Image (cartoon, rainbow, N blue to C red):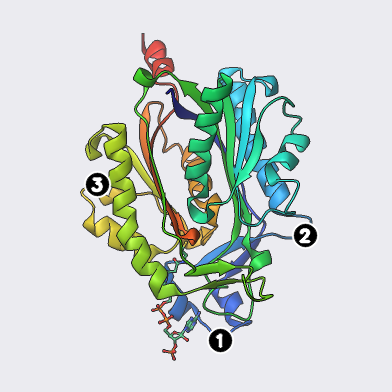
Amino acid sequence: MDHIRILTTGRGIASRTVTNDDLSKVVDTSDDWIYPRTGIHSRQICGEGESVCTLAEEAVGKALEKGKTRFGIREEDIGCVVGATISGATATPSLSCLVQQALHLPEQIPVLDVNAACSGFVYALEVARGLLCANGKRYGLVFGAEALSRLLDWQDRTTCILFADGAGAALIERVPEKEVPYGSFLAARGGTEIVCGGVNTEDPHIRMDGKAVFRFAVTVIPVAAEGALSLAGVPADAISHVICHQANARILGHVMRKSTIPREKFFQNISTAGNTSAASIPSALAQMEEEGLLKEGDLLLLVGFGSGLTYAGMVIGYGRKEAEDEKAE
Ligand code: COA
């Protein structure tokens, strides 16, 4: 089966900044409590006229625009659109179909959302790979977008301090196996430690058993990372950057202490992004691209974990290495 790599990225940032001090005016909390336990100073949430749709459109539109400029890829070259979200604006149509409409993407291609919570973007990449291998098209658009502020109980200090809004996207390319390593490890352990929209109640809000989630996360992150490395057949030192789901700086700190991968390879933006679930990994990637941290030929390790309880690891290449090599010649 062919592999995929990421060619370009984009992100949509919600415009309203909410600091820990702002939250302390709404619920009984403080920066002194939140920052040491989560690493979060502030987060972005949707302002006037913004929604999960506008954020997703912005992120996917930017990834596509960069694809046009850098690689000459056009709308009609796109072979699938796979979005990851737990906070789509409507149960149906899918968020992906709304993005397809807004960006005038082709009709005769598969367009769908996946729900794997904070592992959603990694799941969506693997789904997109399967679709491109099946329909023979070369390029796909994959995104994660959330407006979690809509699903929060703003009186619940155990959740409203963590979650936020945002979107990130990637333009991917299907490539022959030998061209670039790829490994995808997807898993789930059915559980209700994080729920939203009660099964037996009318509660529409996100609820969480924070301590159980913490234990789950630190257990499965190494499993997902090692699973992906092993399936890709590459050693840990081949990895240029690790992009873990930005859930909590303490979880990341714990993982970094135990990992053989040097901590400077772990990207972190939790302090200003908060936890944006499926949007967290792709918007981190887009931020890294904007900051010039990603280089053609980089090998990335993505790790997601969250409600479901899902977890996922992926080794995936960034950019066209040969494009750099050609320039050097
Ligand atoms: N501000 C002030 N006090 C708070 C608070 C807040 N925002 N939230 C909870 N508290 C209080 C609790 O009421 C409790 O008080 P009590 O001892 O009087 O009952 C105390 O702080 C400790 O609460 P606890 O839930 O045990 O805190 P914790 O040390 O487990 O930290 C989390 C809470 C959420 C920071 C931590 O469990 C965590 O990081 N979990 C992982 C969450 C996560 O990443 N979720 C997303 C995964 S995708």
Which is more toward the observer, 292 or 182? 182
- Tag 2 secondary structure: loop
- Which residue sits furthest front? 200
Which quarter of the rendered picture does the N terminus lie within?
Answer: top left
Please state which amino acid type lies under the numbered disc 1: Asp
Quadrant of the image for the C terminus? top left
Looking at the image, can residue 36 be seen?
A: no
Q: Is mark 3 within 8 Å of ligand 1?
A: no
On residue 114, the disc is none
The residue to which callout 2 is attached is 48
Q: Quadrant of ligand 1?
A: bottom left
Residue ID for mark 1? 28
- Residue 315 position (above or below residue 24): above
Task: Determine whether label 2 and label 3 are within 8 Å by CB.
Answer: no
Quadrant of res 110: top right
Residue bearing the label numbered 3: 261
For mark 3, does the 10 Å Cα neighbourhood hold few (<14), some (14 to 19), or many (20 or more) residues?
A: some
- What crowding class fits label 2: few (fewer than 14 Cα within 10 Å), some (14-19), or many (20 or more)? few
Q: Which mark sits nearer the N-terminus, 2 or 3?
A: 2
Instruction: Pick whichever, 25 or 89, lies toward us.
Output: 89
Vertical comparison of 287 with 296: above or below: below
The residue under label 2 is which amino acid type? Answer: Glu
Q: Circle 1 sits in a helix, a strand or a loop, which is it?
A: loop
Between the residue at mark 2 and the residue at mark 3, the CA separation in whole angstroms equals 42 Å
- In the structure shown, which secondary structural element does the residue marked by tag 3 occupy? loop
Side of 203 relative to 37 (left or right): right
Mark 1 lies within 8 Å of ligand 1 (Cβ measured) = yes
Disc 2 and disc 1: Cα gap in Å? Answer: 26 Å
Compared with 156, 17 (above or below) is: above
Residue 184, horizontal then vertical, whole percent: 39, 38
